[in-house]
Image (cartoon, helix red, strand yellow):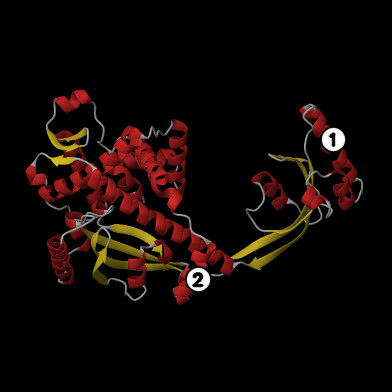
Amino acid sequence: MYKKITLACILFAVVGVTEAKQLLDKVVAVVNNGVITASELNKQVELTKKQIIAQGMQVPGDSVLRKQVLQHLIDVNVQLQMAKQHGLTVDDTELNQAIEKIATANHATVTQLREEITRQGMTWDEYRENIRKEILLSNLQQKAVGRDTVVTNEQVEQYLKTEGGIINRSALTYHLQNIVIPLNEEPTSEEVKKAKSKADSLLVKIKNGGNFSRLAIENSSGEFALEGGDLGERHLAELPELFAKEVVNMKVGQVAGPLRAGNGFQLIKLVSIGGDNQHHVITKTHVRHILLKPDPSMLPEDSKKQVTNIYQQLKSGKDFALMAKQYSLDSSSAVKGGDLGWVSPGVLVPEFEKVMDKLAVNEISPPVKSQFGWHLIQVLGRKQEDDSEAFKKQQVRQFLQQRKFAEAVQNWQQHIRSDAYINIIEKELA
């Protein structure tokens, strides 16, 4: 139930101990102007073991696991240092809201989430700090590459055109695992040959019955290596383009690769296919309104009296359209008797839409306050409309943006790591 929650942040658990402790501890790696100590690494290895066991996977040998955990700690350390340089912080309000959303997404209360986290071997304070750091790194990544990941209407249309029947699969999800055999940004031919050979060797092991999850934990440099390379369920347009072109031709349980990507060679396994292609139907509302904005010289109670007076006139039978033309300060709709036309869900401000959705046809609402002023609302009609094609296009736009962002983050992480000073002191961990 909580697999993704705990593992998403587990690698933050021991980054950032005090200087006093570092002085008394053995340093296993230097990362720029910071260090990772033996106690940090040991604690993280133990936490990772518990998480792997909780997933029902076999724990690899200590030497392999320590290497993998250290590499992830280095990646996190580099990014946390950069976040500090940019002065990024996450306050308690933002943190509490994020934790509440996590609990809700897992159909649990915060108390139940806390109990589960404790059961899995992490203190609640550690968990809160991990989530804080996860939000911090997410904000850093958005700051670093977010502006470069805009998806245009033309890109959506081009995707649908070039991918042919992809739109008919837009509601399907593909559950994947991957193993990444890393390469530098500018690898030599010998490094490429060596990485390809390792990927080929792993593929042979998998085809001979080797456990994909365990081999991912032991060998992958991917973000989800310590989760057995589990990428979770994703829509096609969310997947890296390299993966998307493969999975549409794969059978469940099949492994493909090695695939050459920017960060190295990839092996991917299709675990399952989910979702369906049900129609997406929305309820549209034909609505009109009268908008009154309080005069700066008026007291709040006076503006409320003004709108209440108009409301009473409407209730007594005055024509809504005529009153809108006479009093409404929404110039674009006032000339049409306050008519906003047929509106889709999510178009109007929440305060307006919440009241509108509860009104019967032809019913007039009492005064409603929003950021724009006071509204008097009347629903003229409702109808259901098949929005499937527009919905699918919106989904494709969202998924393409997620894909573009994920690939940009991956390239950025690879770049900042190559620019960082990293010295692994214990050579058996290198």
The residue identified by callout 1 is 306
Q: Is residue 203 left or right of residue 153?
A: left
Q: Is any atom of residue 353 visible in this view?
A: yes
Residue 176 is drawn in which quadrant?
A: bottom left
Q: Nearer the viewer, residue 386 or 160?
A: 160
Q: Position of residue 84 (x, y in %)?
A: 34, 33
Q: Is residue 425 above or below residue 211?
A: above
Q: Amino acid at mark 1?
A: Gln
Q: Position of residue 211 (x, y in %)?
A: 19, 63
Q: Position of residue 97 (x, y in %)?
A: 47, 38
Q: Is residue 61 above or below residue 284?
A: above
Q: Nearer the viewer, residue 279 or 201?
A: 201
The residue identified by callout 2 is 277
x 17%, y 55%: residue: 218
- Say which element carries label 2: loop
x 32%, y 38%: residue: 82
Q: Nearer the viewer, residue 121 or 252?
A: 252
Q: Is any atom of residue 120 visible in this view?
A: no
Judge depth for marks 2 and 1 and give the one in front: 1
* Count of numbered circles in the view: 2
Q: Position of residue 328 (x, y in %)?
A: 82, 45
Residue 384 is drawn in which quadrant?
A: bottom right
Q: State how far apart marks 2 and 1 are (Cα).
A: 50 Å
Q: Nearer the viewer, residue 341 or 405?
A: 405
